């Protein structure tokens, strides 16, 4: 019986809501480390995580048993919740006027 080997790598880019610059320079390292932890938790190997104030790039290796959509859903959902609770905001991120990003 033959064996199959898959080595899948994805490059995913996603932005902050409304492309607002929430990811301040001093917070990026914490956010990127957290994103790497989420990738590990869902069974992926982070290869490179970087970004700027309004978007993030993730490059990771993943199993053929996982879907990119499922991975991205978990990464975006968990990181968004964490950022809202721990890092940036004293109020939920919605429209202008009720958002208060922290430095």
Image: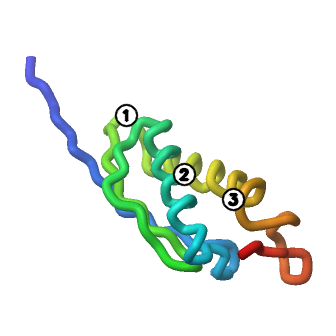
Q: Is residue 80 above or below residue 70?
A: below
| CB-based contact (under 8 Å), mark 2 and mark 3 | no
Q: Which residue is mark 1?
A: 65
Give the answer, above or below, for where 85 lies relative to 55. above
Of mark 3 and mark 1, the one earlier in the sequence is 1
The quarter in which the N terminus is drawn is top left
* Residue denoted by label 2: 34
Farthest-out residue, left: 2
Residue 17, position in %: x, y? Answer: 68, 73
Mark number displayed over residue 83: 3
Residue name at image x 31 percent, y 48 percent: 61
Question: Residue 94, image x and y in percent?
Answer: 83, 71
Answer left or right for 65 relative to 5: right
> Which corner quadrant of the image does residue 50 belong to?
bottom left
Task: Determine the residue positioned at 87% across, 65% down.
Answer: 91
Mark 1 or mark 2: which is in front? 2
Residue 79, given in percent of the width and then of the height, sits at 62, 54
Q: Tag 1: Cα neighbours inside 10 Å, few (<14), some, or many (≥20)?
A: few
For residue 99, the mark is none
Answer with mark 1 or mark 2, whichever residue precedes in sequence.
2
| Residue sitting at x 56%, y 77% | 25
Query: Which image quadrant: the C terminus?
Result: bottom right
69 or 19, nearer to the observer: 19
């Amino acid at each position: 019986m033959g064996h199959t080997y898959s080595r899948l790598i994805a490059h995913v880019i996603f932005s902050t809501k409304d492309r607002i610059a929430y990811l301040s320079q001093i917070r990026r390292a914490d956010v990127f480390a957290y994103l790497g932890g989420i990738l590990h938790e869902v069974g992926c190997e982070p290869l490179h995580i970087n970004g700027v104030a309004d978007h993030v790039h993730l490059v990771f290796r993943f199993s053929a048993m996982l879907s990119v959509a499922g991975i991205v859903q978990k990464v975006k959902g968990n990181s968004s919740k964490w950022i809202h609770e721990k890092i940036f905001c004293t109020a939920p991120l919605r429209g202008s006027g009720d958002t208060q990003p922290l430095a």
